[in-house]
Image (spheres, rainbow, N blue to C red):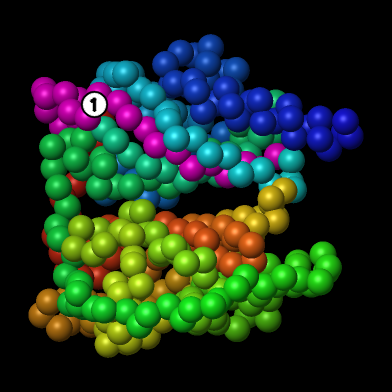
């Protein structure tokens, strides 16, 4: 085993322990798993809950979790190893019994995507993007329904018959084809030019491909079939007044060449989503995951903050009762 492989294996063991341990439950677990300067980050935390907990504020988060969370379990864990032996991406789902904002215990069921960085045997970065709606439901609250003015019953064009996955001649051509497929979605090219958001060319997708937007607000579908995807594209053409993709992004390289996860910050624009017809500003930070299969796109996930989407549509947003 090379030194790089040994480092990855050692760091992965730290990640595994971090994922299965309620690190907030004891000072011993905190000291064992978290570096002294680790900041716990929750970029999509609902309004009312801090998005960052630096070391001096950890006890605020930990006290709240100890008081209000029981029967915590992390399930459906899928790890994605990068070529940087310190960086790990994880998709997972949390279930727990929570007492948030009142005396009643409710079920918390929330999906996440996480970036975990391990340095010197401890977690130095834990950045967790979660579904804010799950937090509100855990507190017995709800979010407004998003004003989606597109069609839900659009019939898509039939997929052409006889589409076969491409067969690259060698690894060099295979790598170029993978990059071309990854580049169909929305981060800037190296020269800073903006990309069109996706493509409708059926040849680049597997037959069962569907767009997955796990945190999209109620009022839109979270899984897009071809008909709803066409409807969303038409709706965006009508309602997007101005849009500029993020200039800040981080693209990891993965041990599995068929996986790409991109973290982007600072996409901005103007949208006409308000039911009264008002044009308002919109900003969004995304995590985008793409998975290929036989040189076609098999999975596309776009994680976004639904609160930002609702605010742009003029929806009222309640404050989450953090620390209650």
Q: Viewed as shown, does residue 32 lie left or right of 320?
A: right
In depth, the one of 149 and 277 nearer the eye is 149
Locate residue 151, reporting x and y percent.
Answer: 20, 77
Please provide the residue range marked out in magenta.
86-107
Locate residue 144, reporting x and y percent.
Answer: 14, 57
Instruction: Determine which quarter of the picture holds residue 147.
Output: bottom left
Where is 318 relative to 93, above or below? Answer: below
The C terminus, quarter of image: top left
In depth, the one of 2 and 269 nearer the eye is 2
Count of marks placed on residues: 1
Q: Is residue 95 magenta?
A: yes
Locate residue 174, reporting x and y percent.
Answer: 75, 68
Q: Viewed as shown, does residue 112 lie left or right of 218?
A: right
| Badge 1 element | strand
Instruction: Determine which quarter of the picture holds residue 94.
Output: top left
The N terminus, quarter of image: top right
What predominant SS class does the magenta segment belong to? Answer: strand
Locate residue 136, reporting x and y percent.
Answer: 21, 42
Q: Which residue is mark 1?
A: 98
Where is 81 relative to 309, above or below? Answer: above
In depth, the one of 158 and 184 nearer the eye is 158
At x 57%, y 34%, the residue is 38
Q: Is residue 60 visible?
A: no
């Amino acid at each position: 085993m090379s030194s790089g492989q040994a480092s990855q294996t050692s760091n992965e063991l730290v990640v595994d322990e971090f994922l299965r341990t309620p690190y907030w439950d004891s000072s011993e677990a905190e000291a064992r798993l978290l570096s002294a300067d680790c900041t716990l980050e929750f970029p999509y935390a609902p309004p009312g809950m801090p998005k960052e907990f630096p070391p001096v504020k950890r006890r605020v988060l930990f006290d709240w979790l100890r008081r209000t969370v029981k029967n915590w379990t992390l399930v459906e864990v899928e790890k994605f190893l990068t070529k940087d032996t310190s960086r790990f991406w994880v998709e997972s789902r949390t279930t727990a019994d929570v007492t948030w904002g009142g005396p009643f215990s409710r079920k918390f069921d929330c999906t996440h995507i996480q970036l975990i960085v391990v340095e010197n045997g401890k977690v130095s970065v834990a950045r967790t993007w979660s579904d804010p709606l799950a937090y509100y439901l855990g507190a017995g609250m709800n979010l407004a329904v998003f004003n989606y003015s597109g069609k839900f019953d659009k019939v898509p064009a039939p997929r052409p018959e006889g589409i076969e996955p491409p067969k690259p001649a060698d690894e060099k051509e295979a790598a170029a084809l993978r990059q071309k497929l990854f580049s169909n979605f929305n981060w800037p090219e190296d020269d800073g030019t903006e990309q069109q958001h996706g493509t409708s060319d059926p040849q680049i997708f597997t037959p069962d491909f569907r767009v997955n937007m796990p945190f999209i607000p109620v009022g839109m579908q979270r899984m897009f079939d071809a008909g709803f995807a066409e409807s969303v594209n038409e709706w965006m053409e009508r309602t997007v007044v101005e849009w500029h993709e993020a200039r800040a992004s981080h693209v990891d390289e993965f041990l599995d060449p068929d996986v790409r996860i991109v973290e982007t910050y600072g996409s901005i624009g103007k949208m006409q989503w308000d039911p009264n017809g008002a044009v308002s500003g919109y900003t969004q930070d995304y995590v985008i995951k793409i998975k290929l299969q036989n040189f076609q796109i098999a999975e596309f996930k776009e994680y976004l903050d639904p609160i930002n989407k609702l605010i742009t549509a003029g929806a009222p947003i309640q404050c989450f009762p953090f620390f209650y």
